[in-house]
């Protein structure tokens, strides 16, 4: 089933004057998982809903969903993933494989005292979510996936090699491969510019970065004015955390694409059997990349994920739909997970 949904035009409670409320009652703690200290934000009591953020984000990307889901009788749990925010960032590139990240999350779930969680994930979090469903489906009741569908392993071509062949050397994932290089280019324009540039992009299609520089990066049409769904205070929260950590931990996820391809070989061809709801914006950079719509709507996605129950395409919404359309996303999450 495919539903094209317009973003709710009703008065949105998620505006600037309510920003302090989006933090209200959220508890923060540090958990020892898989050899690192992980920062976790949580609120509520009941069945656990685990939220995984993407790049360049934090637990804070789920600030609105945490409030709504916790108010509906669930325990909302949102970590900063390894390398992000207030979670430890091991210095070695090799410490950011799919096994490391999934290992962190299995240990986190164990620490919560539950056998299974509802999973909600976006962008890189969505990729990690698919690995979690692939390696440990016994821990996931159902999965609400945002932006990145399950991308089946190609046994003949390593991931980055395939992306380079398809999109060229200036495709952003290819540009992110060499440690230190893109970090230096980002440092030239500054953390605030990088985050604003990426978070506010509405340019569809695969992101191609200017050769040899960060430049206009993801958003060639960046304006001084922030969109209605992102306040100056909210942007400042992201900037403060990335000023502290830098981008290397986050970028190391991309540097393990080919390693993950090697490590996941034993699961080649395995279907994802977890119940799934997939939600993307019609302007999303992944959804609008060549071949992706055919895969999502043409039967390939359903073949790889047989319990894919619904695909939602949000009209007029771009990549960061968990922030841009938070009220609608919260409703979709709740109406899906309450069935289980």
Image: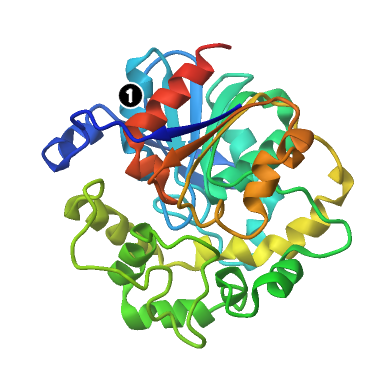
Q: Is residue 321 left or right of residue 111?
A: left
Q: Residue at x 31, y 34 (%)?
A: 64
Q: Quadrant of the N terminus?
A: top right
Whether residue 59 is visible here, answered yes or no, is no
Q: Position of residue 211 (x, y in %)?
A: 52, 86
| Residue at screen point 22% across, 58% down | 226
Residue 97 occupies quadrant? bottom right
> 151 or 64: which is nearer to us?
151
| Disc 1 residue crowd, few under 14, some 14–19, many 20+, Cα 10 Å | many
Where does residue 199 sit, x and y in percent of width and height?
36, 58
Residue 153 vertical position relative to residue 108 in the rendered view, above or below: below
Where 116 sits versus 175, above or below?
above
- Residue drawn at point x = 45 percent, y = 46 percent: 80
Residue visible at 65% across and 78% down in the picture: 168
Task: Give how far across and how far down residue 243 sits, in percent.
Answer: 32, 66
Q: Quadrant of residue 96?
A: bottom right
Which structural element holds mark 1?
Answer: helix
The residue carrying mark 1 is: 68
């Amino acid at each position: 089933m495919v539903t094209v949904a317009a973003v709710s035009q009703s008065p949105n409670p998620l505006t600037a004057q309510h920003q302090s409320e989006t933090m209200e009652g959220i508890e923060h703690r540090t958990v020892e998982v898989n050899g690192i200290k992980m920062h976790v934000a949580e609120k509520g009591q009941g069945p656990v809903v685990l939220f995984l953020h993407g790049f360049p984000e934090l637990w804070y990307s789920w600030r609105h969903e945490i409030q709504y889901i916790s108010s509906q009788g669930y325990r909302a749990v949102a970590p900063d993933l390894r390398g992000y925010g207030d979670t430890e960032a091991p210095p070695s590139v090799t410490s950011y494989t799919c096994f490391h990240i999934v290992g962190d999350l299995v240990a986190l779930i164990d620490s919560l005292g539950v056998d299974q969680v509802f999973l909600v994930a976006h962008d890189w979090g969505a990729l990690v979510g698919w690995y979690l469903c692939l390696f440990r489906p016994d821990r996931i009741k159902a999965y609400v996936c945002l932006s990145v569908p399950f991308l089946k392993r190609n046994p003949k071509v390593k991931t980055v090699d395939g992306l380079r062949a398809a999109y060229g050397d200036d495709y952003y994932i290819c540009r992110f491969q060499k440690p230190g290089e893109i970090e230096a280019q980002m440092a030239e324009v500054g953390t605030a510019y990088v985050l604003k540039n990426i978070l506010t992009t509405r340019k569809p299609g695969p992101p191609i970065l200017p050769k040899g520089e960060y430049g206009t990066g993801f958003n060639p049409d960046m304006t001084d004015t922030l969109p209605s769904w992102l306040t100056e205070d909210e942007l400042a929260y992201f900037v403060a955390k990335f000023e502290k950590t830098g981008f290397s931990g986050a970028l190391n996820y991309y540097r393990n694409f080919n390693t993950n391809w090697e490590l996941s070989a034993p699961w080649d061809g395995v279907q994802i059997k977890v119940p799934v709801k997939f939600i993307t914006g019609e302007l999303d950079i992944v959804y609008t990349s060549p071949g992706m719509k055919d895969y999502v709507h043409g039967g390939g996605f359903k073949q790889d994920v047989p319990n894919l129950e619904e695909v939602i395409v949000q009209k007029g919404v771009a990549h960061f739909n968990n922030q841009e359309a938070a009220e609608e996303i919260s409703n979709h999450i709740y109406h899906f997970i309450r069935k289980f």
